[in-house]
Image (spheres, helix red, strand yellow):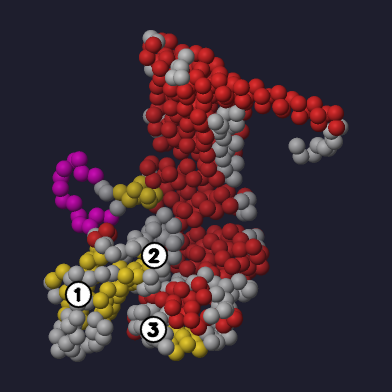
Amino acid sequence: MHGRVKIKSTAQQEEEKRKEREKKLKAFVSARDAVLKKRSAGEHDEDALQLTQLLLSSNPDIATLWNYRREVLLHLETLREKDEVQKLYESELHFIEACLKVNPKSYGCWHHRSWVNPRLPQPDWTRELGLCDRCLSLDERNFHCWDYRRTVVKASGVSVEQELQFTDRLIGSNFSNYSSWHYRSTLLPQLHPQPAPDSAPDTSPSPSASPQIHSHRVCEEQLLKEYELAHNAFFTDPNDQSAWFYYRWLLGRAEREEMISCVYASREGERVSVAFSKPVQALSEGLMLVLDGQPQQVEWRSVHPRFRHSPVWLCDLPPGSITDMSNEHNLTVHWTEKHTHRDCALYTGSAESWCRDSATDQELFRSELSVEKGSVLQAELQSCNQLLELEPQNKWCLLTIILLMRALDPLGHEKETLAHFQTLREVDPMRSSYYSDLCSKFLIENTILKMEYAEVRVFSLSNKVLEADDNAIESLEGLHHLPKLEEVSLKNNQICKLSDLESLASCIKLTRLDLRGNPVHKTANVESELSQLLPLVTALTL
């Protein structure tokens, strides 16, 4: 134990301990063999319960013994009256509780208790809730107990409001109770759901009509109260991560759905490419292409054979489908899994055409933080800035401010964002690579937002050191939104590994790449490796 002086044992004491361990082991092995022998013989009696109890009392983590014990209990249950069955299982609960004192995080104990209670003719759920309270008072992050509590709450009919008050008590006594914050995040959408906006006014006079709700969102009124609770927590202890994670969940509760962001068609090669808002898994059967009203039999493939998740998927049309420049064609790509589609028109005289998502430029790279009102984000940014004045090197506050700025105005806050990233690398050097990757991602997105990105054929990030340390960035994300991109310059950066360039495979028209001044040129067989990754690139400069 901490603070206690370690007293060295003599040779005689060590020998006595060894003999004692051997004696216990011998007794344990003997009892174990007896139990296994009885089970093999199909014996399900009181003696089996006593033997397994002896073994599990010293080691409650042997699943085989719990399984055998359940077999015995099921057999005894058929031989006894209802009152005797009640006593049998109540005795079992007392035994499990004793085992939990040996190991409060025993998988076997909690699983067995979950099995026993439903078999009681008259289960005492109030007692079980009390047990959970006691266990959580000893270890507030005992996830076995939290799981069991949810089972008890569901079976006993405890209201969501009561459970929310339970989290109030735990969080009030300890802001660092991450499990309570998480449990709270599962309760709020049930108790305070946000009504979904109706697509059209409901003129039905039916009294049974009720508004739709977002199953994972919280109403704005309650959300403001939750912000205040989180503020109290991280203004009290700014370095505790629990409240910051909960705060991020509150801000980012409205996740954007996956969608088709762009469809590109080219007469040359008779190829169609589909770009998505984020990389998606193999879509060989999930996409359907319709050309001039006729479904096409095509094979979809990712931008590279080894990419099972890809932001861009390609297919080749049957020969002669769209080569004639004098013909106009209408294409529709259906994503059956998401029940969505996107149209693309290839006009007469045009060699290529694209149709991107109608969302605004800011929505293209929308931050994970998303609330209904921008004024709410602005107010939260002001609160975080106030805390930053008091705690200028708090990494949680700095990162949250960056994300809030990205959600509000990524270009307007670019200078401040870069300065905060630099501070983050200094105060949290262990995660400097993560901050550099995130900074690189934002820089690329901002560069794209500053241009008419759908028409861009040349993209340059030359002389922008994408990282402030010696680690390589993870990827160059976002370039797949540039369907006509033919040339990329990354001169004089800190790109170290070929894997940093994998996302360039999504640029299906890329033919020229400038990597001068990057450490990646030191990689063995770099040219041959790049030629496999980017087979269309014919002008590579290292």
Q: Nearer the viewer, mark 1 or mark 2?
A: 2
In magenta segment, residue 198: yes
Secondary structure beneath dot 1 equals strand
Image location of residue 297, percent across then percent down: 19, 69
The circle on residue 309 is 2
- Depicted 400 relative to depicted 223: above or below: below
Look at the numbered discs 1 and 2 and tell me whether their residues touch, using CB distance below 8 Å. no
Secondary structure beneath dot 3 equals loop
- Magenta stretch, main secondary structure class: loop
Look at label 1 and name its amino acid.
Leu
Give the residue pinned by disc 3. Answer: 536
Give the residue pinned by disc 1. Answer: 331
Whichever of labels 1 and 3 marks the residue nearer the N terminus, that label is: 1
Mark 1 surroundings within 10 Å by alpha-carbon count, few (fewer than 14), some (14 through 19), many (20 or more) = many
Q: Is residue 320 left or right of residue 414?
A: left
Q: Which residues are magenta?
A: 197-210
